[in-house]
């Protein structure tokens, strides 16, 4: 049985995908709801604690608003905060994000390691985007807030790339789309390709775990099986969802 966090207002929460910087609730409510989700992740043993720097998150958010070209995004302020907080708490040396479009999903994870929201030093923060033109835009966006090059975007097929990655992956973020037959079901293929790179305690974050659940049947069955993952929680506070699983 899946463990789930569902906010009291998930049926009513709506963001504008074309205007993602517009706040649809108070910072206090946003923070409280994300804290509830983080607390459940802590209770399930996925996170060691729930402390992160709220001011650095807001500095990261401001930089993205000022410098990123985002034609549209489904990453709500709640999801941005959750992804940032998870990475700020775990502080992965190597974080890989598969399927990043214009880079907003990627930097929501990587922003804890680079730019004005940085709170630790990372080794490799890599965003993978199979469409070259989108990868180029994402790389331009990232370069505007990360002069170090630690966060970088590569135009590549995620299945092939993660299989060849020579280091352990502490956080793997999945938001890719496969061909017409697989769609979001490609998450399962990416996870299997990365499996040998995921050490004990590694986290796998799968976006669209709610609104694309039918396409993710095989993936969700795998991560919710205790034979494969120590714990898995479905966070649902914006209608999109994020499955957070620990190996």
Image (cartoon, rainbow, N blue to C red):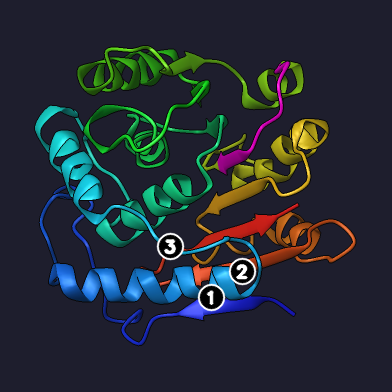
Classed neighbour count for the residue bearing mark 2: other residues with Cα under 10 Å, few (<14), some (14–19), many (≥20):
many
Magenta run includes residue 169 = yes
Mark yes or no: residue 25 visible: yes
Which residue is denoted by mark 3 in the rendering?
240
Tell me which numbered mark, 3 or 2, is placed earlier along the sequence: 2
Give how far apart the Cα atoms at labels 3 and 2 are: 14 Å
62 displayed left or right of 89:
left
What residue is drawn where x is 60% and y is 75%? Answer: 43
- In the image, 70 versus 120, the foreground residue is 120
Classed neighbour count for the residue bearing mark 3: other residues with Cα under 10 Å, few (<14), some (14–19), many (≥20):
some
What residue is drawn where x is 52% and y is 33%? Answer: 97
- In the image, 124 versus 241, the foreground residue is 124
Residue 39 vertical position relative to residue 174 in the rendered view, above or below = below
Which residue is denoted by mark 2 in the rendering?
233
Q: Tag 1's secondary structure? A: helix
Between label 1 and label 2, give the one nearer the viewer.
1
Residue 40's disc number? 1
Residue 155 vertical position relative to residue 188 in the rendered view, above or below = above
Main SS of residues in magenta: loop
Give how far apart the Cα atoms at labels 1 and 2 are: 8 Å
What residue is drawn where x is 63% and y is 63%? Answer: 214
Residue 108 in picture, x, y percent from top left = 35, 42
Residue 32 in picture, x, y percent from top left = 29, 76
Residue 88 vertical position relative to residue 92 in the rendered view, above or below = below
Give how far apart the Cα atoms at labels 1 and 3 are: 18 Å
Between label 3 and label 2, give the one nearer the viewer.
2
| Contact, mark 1 vs mark 2 (Cβ under 8 Å) | yes
Q: What are the residue bounds of the magenta stretch? A: 165-173
């Amino acid at each position: 049985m899946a463990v789930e966090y569902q906010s009291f207002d998930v049926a009513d929460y709506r963001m504008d995908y074309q205007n993602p910087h517009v706040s649809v609730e108070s910072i206090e409510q946003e923070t409280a709801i994300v804290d509830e989700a983080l607390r459940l992740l802590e209770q399930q043993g996925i996170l060691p604690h729930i402390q992160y720097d709220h001011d650095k998150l807001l500095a990261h958010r401001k930089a993205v608003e000022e410098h990123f070209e985002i034609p549209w995004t489904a990453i709500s302020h709640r999801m941005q905060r959750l992804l940032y907080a998870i990475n700020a708490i775990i502080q992965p040396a190597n974080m890989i994000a598969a399927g990043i479009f214009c880079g907003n999903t990627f930097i929501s994870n990587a922003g804890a390691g680079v730019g004005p929201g940085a709170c630790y030093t990372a080794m490799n923060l890599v965003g993978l985007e199979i469409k070259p033109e989108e990868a180029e835009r994402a790389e331009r966006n990232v370069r505007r807030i990360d002069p170090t090059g630690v966060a970088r975007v590569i135009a590549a097929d995620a299945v092939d790339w993660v299989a060849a990655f020579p280091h352990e992956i502490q956080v793997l973020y999945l938001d890719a789309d496969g061909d017409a037959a697989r769609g979001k079901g490609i998450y399962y293929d990416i996870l299997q390709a990365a499996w040998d790179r995921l050490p004990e305690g590694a986290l796998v974050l799968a976006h669209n775990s709610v609104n694309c659940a039918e396409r993710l049947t095989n993936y969700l069955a795998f991560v919710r099986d205790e034979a494969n993952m120590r714990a898995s929680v479905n966070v649902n506070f914006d209608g999109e969802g994020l499955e957070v699983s620990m190996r």
